[in-house]
Amino acid sequence: MSESDDIRPGEIAVEAPPPDDARLRFIGRCVTPFAERKDCPRQGRLDGPECRLEIFAPWGRALDGIEAFETLDVLYWLDRSRRDLVLQSPKSDGGLRGTFSLRSPVRPNPIGLARVRLVRREGDTLVVRGLDCLNGTPLVDIKPDRCAFSVQAPPKAADRC
Amino acid sequence: MSESDDIRPGEIAVEAPPPDDARLRFIGRCVTPFAERKDCPRQGRLDGPECRLEIFAPWGRALDGIEAFETLDVLYWLDRSRRDLVLQSPKSDGGLRGTFSLRSPVRPNPIGLARVRLVRREGDTLVVRGLDCLNGTPLVDIKPDRCAFSVQAPPKAADRC
């Protein structure tokens, strides 16, 4: 994590204890054509360029069955983002917004969330469209898109209408 | 984290090093009517019961501006889930699926993702519908729903069609 970014006028940083409530293990990495921040789109598009999700051992088999889904939720770790801003000025015009009302990479837990289109699986790698992150961004999780997802387990009482 | 759950026939656990690639700080907690796992729906519904997202200090002001959004993405930490399964049998019938092709709470990084409807803000608390997690589940992040979200910053080259 780097906190080296400049603060824009009006933005408010807070002091918070070091984060240590839970720990992540990276399950892979994103290979994208975006080498620098200025190359990244603000939001990925399902018709964007092909990118790759490379899964590290021992998690490769956890992809089994994923070919059945057209779209996926991808969680990744924005490892270059500062984590201490509560108010941000995304337009740099002095207009302030709370961090949780933005999809900015600057947040207390810098987890990015993209919905991507699955193009194909190649072994332990998924080829997808829709990522917006830097090349090399660490992967945290992959889930089937909730809209496309059919619950596999038997219904429970709380699932009833 | 508890790894005490039984493994079902055919499920495959792996050995992985302790997770320490990145660290989270909990930003609040979910208050839901679901006291035990059996009470939780498989997936939340936008017309489900009212729940509360209580934000801890110093992050309250990070909610500013959130009232403009009807739906939000909520990330939370499934602190009771085992983290070592690559293949799971959600129907307990011997049929196996990879962890990343399921929305099961059992995953290498047990982060749950719910899309919720924002009912109202009450100070540092959001009242929402659509959560499916246990009462007391730690909160990791809140983002405006990407579909409802209008990018606030000026367009960049990579945003063009």
Image: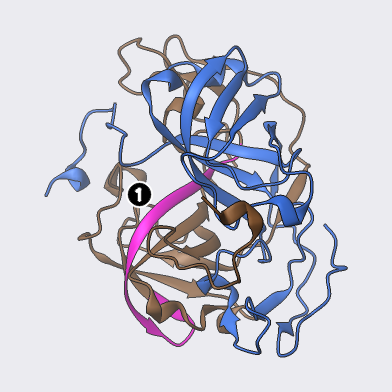
Chain colours: A blue, B brown
Residue A68: quadrant of the picture: top left
**Residue A65 lies within the magenta run:** no
In the image, residue B110 lies in the stretch drawn in magenta: yes
Q: Nearer the viewer, residue B2 or A71?
A: A71
Where residue B23 appears, x then y in whole percent? 74, 52
Residue appearing at x 55%, y 23% in the figure: B85
Left or right relative to B17: residue A140: left
Please say if B56 is above or below A75: below
* Category of crowding for the residue at label 1, using alpha-carbon neighbours closer than 10 angstroms: few (below 14), some (14–19), many (at least 20): few
In the figure, A26 relative to A80: above or below? Answer: above
Q: Residue furthest right?
A: A4
Q: Is residue B50 above or below residue B110?
A: below
Q: Which residue is mark 1?
A: B36
Q: Horizontal and vertical percent for residue A17?
A: 78, 71
Image point 35% across, 57% down: which residue?
Answer: B131
Q: Amino acid at mark 1?
A: Glu
Range shown magenta:
B109-126
**Residue A87 screen position, x and y as percent:** 64, 82
Q: Which chain does tag 1 point to? A: B
Q: Residue at x 79, y 50 (%)?
A: A36
Tell me: B146 left or right of A4. left
In terms of depth relative to the viewer, which is nearer, A33 or B6? Answer: A33
